[in-house]
Amino acid sequence: MDISTSSHIYDLEQPRYFGAPVFPSHAPGLLYTLHRRHEQIENEHRTSASGFVYMAEHSGTHIDALCHQAEEMHLYGGQAINPTIQTSTGFTALGVETIAPIVARGILLDVARYRNVERIEAGNSMTRADLEAAAQSEGVSIREGDVVLARTGSGALWHDAAEYLRSGGMSADASTWLAEQRVLAVGADNMTWDEIGVVDPDLRVSLPGHLILLVRHGIYIIENLYLEALARDRCYEFTFVCLPLKIQGATGSPVRPIAVTMNLQ
């Protein structure tokens, strides 16, 4: 019997442009201008164009480095923030350049489908119970070292910035549960993984998942993913590939993650 393999690649990055959704403190997100333009030059058949990119590291589809968040002025591993660690040109510890290329087993937890809604809106956070139930309904289990992607359904609204920013996010107990599974990274199709503006009553912080995952457990967070094609095809298990840029000392990096599936024919 002849067996051949073919792969299918899902592009999980949202398009980047001025006016795309962005967390207010990171606005304008991205600016691109042409620096040189194609112009006909006498006696030259070749012309050239090039531009400048100005962008916030936490705009678009991106990964958070461990230096991005702190608790009581301490980073992951108990490193105290001081002028040696936090400098005017970036961090000398836990910068995004320390994130190795990620090639891992990926899991999609389609919470929107499990709840039977088009999208999960603000005020309706995803809980540990949602994640566990979605995993059970999909027939997948979370293993140590996995990358877990949670779908809110908001990725389809990327071109409507105001509506996209109204997405729901993760509750603290959902982030705690994923940390207990010892995952490598998590991601979602919303702006901040957590829900914007919600303060956890126990931790007494906004964005509690950032505290739990980045600071307390050293687990990376990937935000603004495009998960609609994976969800459409009910592709719940795949190889996840993500390559952060080596921007020395940066607190995050734009990424173009992909999901790869192998089909036996």
Image (cartoon, grey):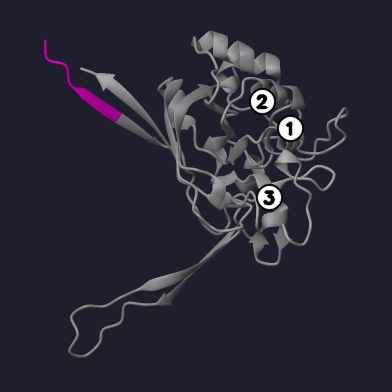
Which element type, helix, strand or loop, lies under badge 3? loop
Query: Dot 1 corresponds to which residue?
Result: 212
Q: Residue at x 55, y 48 (%)?
A: 98
Position above or below: 54 against 262 = below
Position above or below: 228 against 133 = below
Q: Is residue 166 left or right of residue 114?
A: right
Between marks 2 and 3 in the image, the one whose residue lies nearer the viewer:
2
Which element type, helix, strand or loop, lies under badge 1? helix
Q: Which residues are magenta?
A: 1-7
Task: State the mark number for residue 179.
Answer: 2
Marks 2/1: CA distance? 8 Å
Position above or below: 250 against 77 = below
On-image quarter of the C terminus: top left
> Residue lying furthest bottom in this view?
42
On-image quarter of the N terminus: top left
Q: Nearer the viewer, residue 219 or 208?
A: 219
Q: Residues within 10 Å of mark 3 (few under 14, many from 20)?
A: some
Query: Dot 3 corresponds to which residue?
Result: 23
Visible residue check, residue 164 = yes
Q: Indicate which disc, 3 or 1, sits on the residue closer to the N terminus.
A: 3
Q: Amino acid at mark 2?
A: Ala
